[in-house]
Image (cartoon, grey):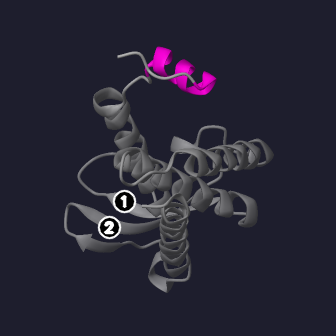
Amino acid sequence: MKKKYSLLIAFACVLVLIGIDQLTKWLCNTNEILLSGDKIILIKNFISFRLAYNKGAAWSILEGKKFFLVSISLLASVFVTYMIVRLVDFKNNLLLSIALILIDAGSIGNLIDRAFYSEGVIDFLHLEFIDFPTFNVADSCLTVGAIVLMVYVLFFYKEPDKKNSLNNELGEEENA
């Protein structure tokens, strides 16, 4: 697959995931039941919608440090977007490509909330069976992307052969 098509697919996936994240946040943030403080049970004793706002990062750390969090989120999003441009390759590095797409979408999704909503990041997914913070689609993208990236690094990543890559850079033939 040509690089430009891989990039087109990658950025289309990022945009779709950001769209799903922002749409679900908007739907929950405009729902009268959720705005009243009640919850909507999706699967009893498993998962529900419960509206919450987070002015910090994960688990509300750095709460109230909006400028810092927006800056870090923006830098992370730019870096991951750059990594997509450099490394996306669905044929040879499918796991890495998926991980970068998920991480970028999650980072940008929460960046939008931090930058444009005074309430902070809109969270709405609540696990009923465990004491765990409420989260959103962007958080899920970040978490799954980080797990996929760890699997890729631990089990699939191969160090480039330094001798051959140096020879290729110098224009010399590989020694067999």
Give the side of residue 56 with respect to residue 87, left or right: right
The residue located at (73%, 50%) in the rendering is 70
The vertical placement of 118 against 81, above or below, is below
According to the picture, the residue beneath numbered tag 2 turns out to be: 48
The residue located at (80%, 47%) in the rendering is 67
Instruction: Mark 1 and mark 2 in contact? Answer it, CB < 8 Å.
Output: yes
According to the picture, the residue beneath numbered tag 1 turns out to be: 126
Quarter placement of the N terminus: bottom left
Of residues 80 and 30, the one nearer the viewer is 80
The vertical placement of 143 against 1, above or below, is above
* Mark 1, secondary structure of its residue: strand
The answer to if 170 sits in the magenta stretch is yes
Q: What is the crowding at mark 2: few (fewer than 14 residues within 10 Å), some, or many (at least 20)?
A: some
Identify the magenta region: 161-171
Give the side of residue 46 with respect to residue 68, left or right: left
The residue located at (49%, 50%) in the rendering is 88
Amino acid under disc 1:
His
- Furthest residue in direction front, as rendered: 173
Q: Position of residue 155 (x, y in %)?
A: 28, 30
